[in-house]
Image (cartoon, rainbow, N blue to C red):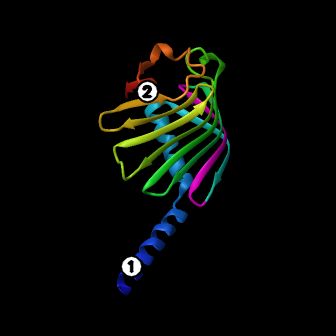
Amino acid sequence: MQMVKKSTIVLVAAWLSMLVLMPKKELYYKLEESLATSYDIKFNEKKLEEGLFSVTLKEVTVYVKGIDVATIKELKLSTFLFYNRIALRSLRLDDTLKRMMPQETQEAVIAYSVLEPLQVSIEASGSFGAMEGRADLKERKVRLDFNESKQLQMLKPQLKQDRKGWFCETSF
């Protein structure tokens, strides 16, 4: 019994030390480089803060193919090795995109867990109401369910309706 207790303490201590000592800024830079080379998406952040378990970016401007498409007040990347999370606060799209999609999103959370290795959960709330969804990594499909139907007029041509409400389903 003592051996099990000591082994558990050693494993927990090793896991915590890995999380705290992990080079979080370098992970962010690697993600940024990957997005830039694969999809031509670039970030320009005014401030980068490293916490114990996360990296927080403040006042982020998002560029797609060199065009300014969005501004994010705060973007927080958290990793716990078995559970990873990206949280956005105050996402505002450029005025040229407001006819195609809602311009403001107050919060958005994208989470991945090792317990569901082929699923990514997505939650957001904004001027469109609330939305939750899942991305299936194996089938390469995304389904987003809109819980409230505030200002969905610009999205309705892309949405379908079932007994639960409005949803969007697409593949990637």
Residue at the disc numbered 1 = 7
Mark 1 surroundings within 10 Å by alpha-carbon count, few (fewer than 14), some (14 through 19), many (20 or more):
few
Look at the image and give the residue range highlighted in magenta: 52-65
Residue 88 placement (x, y as % from top left): 59, 40
What is the three-letter code of the residue carrying label 2?
Answer: Lys
Q: Is residue 10 left or right of residue 68?
A: left
Where residue 118 appears, as percent x and y from the top left, is: 34, 43
41 drawn magenta: no
Q: Are the residues tagged 2 and 1 within 8 Å (C-beta)?
A: no
State the SS at label 2: loop
Look at mark 2 in the image and give the residue it sits on: 164
Q: Which of marks 2 and 1 is nearer the N terminus?
A: 1
Label the magenta part by its dominant secondary structure: strand
The answer to which of 16 and 115 lies nearer the viewer is 115
Is-magenta flag for residue 56? Answer: yes
63 vs 6, left or right, is right
Q: Residue at x 45, y 53 (%)?
A: 83
Front position among marks 2 and 1: 2
**Residue 76 horizontal side relative to residue 146, left or right:** right
Q: Residue furthest bottom?
A: 2
Q: Distance between the residues labelled 2 and 1?
A: 48 Å
